[in-house]
Image (cartoon, rainbow, N blue to C red):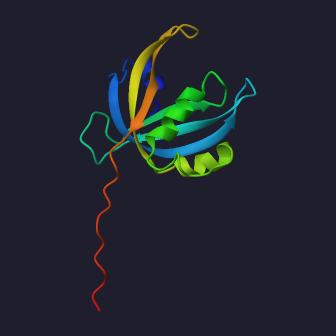
Amino acid sequence: MNWKTLFEQGELPPEGEYEVIIEEAKVSVYSSRNQGIDLKLLIRPDIEQPGQGQELEDRLVDTPNSLYKLRMLVKAIEGLQEQEWNGLHELRKLLVGQPVRVYMRHYEDRIHEETVARISRYIKGMPLAIEAVDSPAE
């Protein structure tokens, strides 16, 4: 579910923090000819919170004025700062499946004259619970 389009249906998600998992990360080239990563984020269904199981989207553009958001995301994922990666294609692979917490705010899109939901902050999220698997009986 793309929350940016829900507004057209009269709904807008509440502002606030959400625990999410990065479901998809795709490198894209935009009309500005800048590269970036398009993210699809799943609001974690294993944590009690509004919007469980719904999807959010975000775009991280690789430009000097937008790098703060990419840096925020890398810092929010435990151990990612210590890993080596060369370029957006390698980073994209490291992002998928990672838990993070996002803060979503409402903004006025003056071009399209509508209110939209956007992710304004990435912070360290709650770790994924790994359930113990019993070894098969011999």
Q: Tell which of 80 and 127 is nearer to you.
A: 80
Q: Residue at x 54, y 7 (%)?
A: 110
Image spot of residue 67 (x, y percent):
60, 29
Could you tell whether 102 is left or right of 95 in the image? left
Residue occupying image coordinates x 34% and y 53%: 128
Residue 41's spot in the image, x, y percent? 46, 40
Q: How many marks?
A: 0
The spot of residue 54 in percent (x, y) is 38, 38
Residue located at (37% from left, 21% from top): 12
Q: Residue furthest left?
A: 48
Residue at the far front in the pictured view? 82
Q: Quadrant of the N terminus?
A: top left
**Relative to 16, is 40 above or below?**
below
Rendered view: 90 above or below 66: below
Query: Which of the 4 quarters of the picture holds residue 77?
Result: top left
Residue 87 coordinates in the image, percent (x, y)? 68, 44
Q: Is residue 50 above or below residue 86?
A: above
Considering depth in this image, is 121 or 113 the residue closer to the camera? 121
The foreground one among 19 and 116 is 19
The quadrant in which the C terminus is found is bottom left
* In the image, farthest residue toward the bottom: 138
Residue 44 placement, left or right of 29 = left
Residue sitting at 52 percent across and 7 percent down? 113
